[in-house]
Image (tube, rainbow, N blue to C red):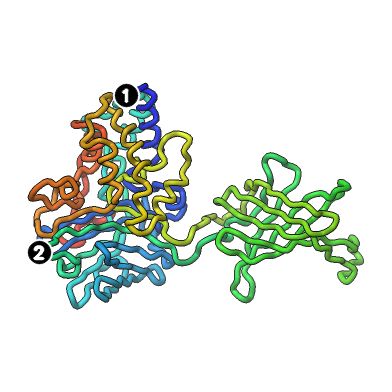
Amino acid sequence: MIRSTLFAALTFVSSLAFAADHRDAPVATNDVAADINDVYTFVNPNNPQELIVALTVVPVANALSQFSAAVDYRIHLGDQVLTCRFPGSVRFECTGLGNQTVSGNVGSTGQSGNGLRVYAGLRDDPFFFDLNAFNATRNALAPRFNNPGSNFFAGLNTLSIVVGIPTALTGATAASPVVKVYASTRRTGGAGISAGISGSWYDAANPGHGFFLEVIRGSDGVERLNALWAVYNNAGGQLYLLGVGEIVNNTSTITAVSTAGGRFPPPFDSSSVQRVPFGTLTFTFNDCNTGTLQYNGTNPLFLTSGTIALNRLTSISGVSCSLLSSGQIDRMGRPGINTALINVLPGTGSALKNAYNAAEGVANWTQFTAEMAANLAALDTLDGQVGNSLLPPATLASVLVDDRLLVDTSKPACDEYLAVELGVAGKCGGRTLARDVIDDTFGAVVGPGVSDFVGNDSVFLSDFPFLGNPN
């Protein structure tokens, strides 16, 4: 029984090709510019009156990677929000925390009159973890970590937003010095069907008829889906249904017609062509390779309706596809919560992972408590022992479901992860760049002494923005 549970636990954790929050759910993975990697927060070691919050996005970034002009990057401090936007992707403007505004060029630091400062640009990814050894552990169903381990993330870069916030702007007071921090991304434009969806599609369960789809932009600037369905009529003759419909996010409904009365050219008299109404075709896409067609025939010859599964058959050479969602795409406070504690057992799919990231407002997060408790119970078996995690699964789930980093701004030296949450006296909490949160997490949810034997290998700056220079 323990062996089967161990397999389930290892399978779910490793399903994450990356770790922490990198690529933790399908919607975020598909929207690279809105995919949060990590969140760090700590009191500035050079200035105890400044809180540092670092948000990293875009896994495996390079010199060509850009923040999106259609994504809001948001840092939440208690009830306050600092929102950073990137018009044209080359400049940033951050607003919030008492009507503060900071702007500057990507790759530089801007500062407000009240001391709020922001850096945005490419940096070394500070996260460290032996992913390859973990995958080997999964495959063998036994520990395969080496001492020392090898950091999978060594030499990788990420896009970073680093904020220096005067304590007076954080909402912290002498009587209530703890600040609760998390980050989120929200797509404000560019969502839904894009040109990359163009190509030929078919029903894999019933091949022999198919669809030619093309995203077009009219002179009015509106994008529409141009569709042709090569199918057959009830007598077995060839039938082509075609039409154009406006695109709304990932759906387009067209009023379809067939044509008759024409002749093979030459000569060809366009005035003799008749347009015969069919009904409506509604195309909805799940991603770049799958979708559904809902058809509703209103012609007396085709008084029928139904649903057909769509699968991509071909694509347009040189045209990449991204089917982006609108609204909140990703959120993160502590590392690995969605990755390791949501929708992780085999066969559970990924819908709940997307829902977790999309859930706005702390009051809505408690819906995930039971899910976390179940998976914490599975994780507790990873070292072959049951009951040696830091807290019972239900208790630990009630702590972790409030997915915010807690940092005590009255304690100038930050180091110990989860210190405030667990009531460790005299500790700042938060998450520093060098803290080994993987070992901390293994120790808390699996058992004491569990480690991947990887330590920090980044070279951090001694002052703002602290994250290391890009590789």
User: Which dot marks residue 142?
Assistant: 1
Q: Marks 1 and 2, Cα distance to the nearest angstrom?
A: 49 Å
Residue 113 position, x and y percent, is: 19, 78
In depth, the one of 281 and 376 nearer the eye is 376
Q: Callout 2, which amino acid? A: Ala
| Mark whose residue sits in front, 1 or 2 | 2
Mark 1 burial class by Cα count in 10 Å: few <14, some 14-19, many 20+? some
Residue beneath the point at 13% across and 53% down = 428
Mark 2 burial class by Cα count in 10 Å: few <14, some 14-19, many 20+? few
Residue 277 position, x and y percent, is: 81, 63
In depth, the one of 122 and 86 nearer the eye is 86
> How many marks on residues?
2
Residue beneath the point at 39% across and 68% down = 89
Residue 308 position, x and y percent, is: 68, 47
**Which residue is at the far bottom?**
113
Residue 249 position, x and y percent, is: 55, 62
Whether residue 385 appears in this view of the structure is: yes
Q: Callout 1, which amino acid? A: Ala
The quadrant the N terminus occupies is: top left
| CB within 8 Å, label 1 to label 2 | no
- Residue beneath disc 2: 174
Report helix, strand or loop for mark 1: loop
